[in-house]
Image (cartoon, helix red, strand yellow):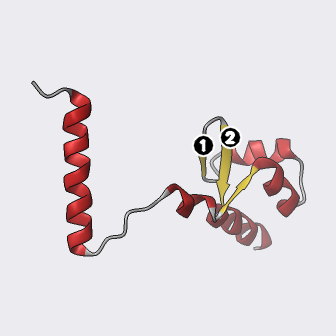
């Protein structure tokens, strides 16, 4: 019998093949990191405290993802927040 991990590996490898055939480039973790900031860096960019950035995250004003235990904020969501704040 095939276990769940083996089946998942088969499905993901087939998905990779299909994406290559239709010209979709798979996204890598580095695609997200290039346009992302830590809470500390985001607070410097926004000119506010790290606690304020955490509140923005809590109220879904900023899009985040995790690398291990570190929370990263996407640059797109930072741009969107700054643009909305200027209006």
Figure check: 21 above or below 38 = below
Residue 78 location in percent, x, y? 70, 63
Residue 5 occupies quadrant:
top left
Q: Which residue is mark 2?
A: 70
Residue under the point 83% across and 46% down: 52
Figure check: 20 above or below 8 = below
Residue under the point 67% across and 43% down: 71
Question: SS of the residue at dot 2?
Answer: strand
Query: Is residue 4 found left or right of 31 in the rendered image?
Result: left
Figure check: 7 above or below 30 = above
Question: SS of the residue at dot 1?
Answer: strand
Residue 69 location in percent, x, y? 65, 35
Seen from the viewer's position, the closer of residues 73 and 8 is 8
Query: Is residue 1 found left or right of 58 in the rendered image?
Result: left
Residue positioned most to the left: 1
Q: Residues within 10 Å of mark 2 (few under 14, many from 20)?
A: few
Q: Which quadrant would the N terminus be assigned to in this image?
A: top left
Seen from the viewer's position, the closer of residues 77 and 39 is 39
Q: Which residue is mark 1?
A: 66
The reply to whether callout 2 and callout 1 are in contact (CB within 8 Å) is yes
Residue under the point 62% across and 58% down: 33
Residue 87 location in percent, x, y? 75, 74
**Residue 26 badge:** none
Residue 21 occupies quadrant:
bottom left
Residue under the point 43% across and 62% down: 27
């Amino acid at each position: 019998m095939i276990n769940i991990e083996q089946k998942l590996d088969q499905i993901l490898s087939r998905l990779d093949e299909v994406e290559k055939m239709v010209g979709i480039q798979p996204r890598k973790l580095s695609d997200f990191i290039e346009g992302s900031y830590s809470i500390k860096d985001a607070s410097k960019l926004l000119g506010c405290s790290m606690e304020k950035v955490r509140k923005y995250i809590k109220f879904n004003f900023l899009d985040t993802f995790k690398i291990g235990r570190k929370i990263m904020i996407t640059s797109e969501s930072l741009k969107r927040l700054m643009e909305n704040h200027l209006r």
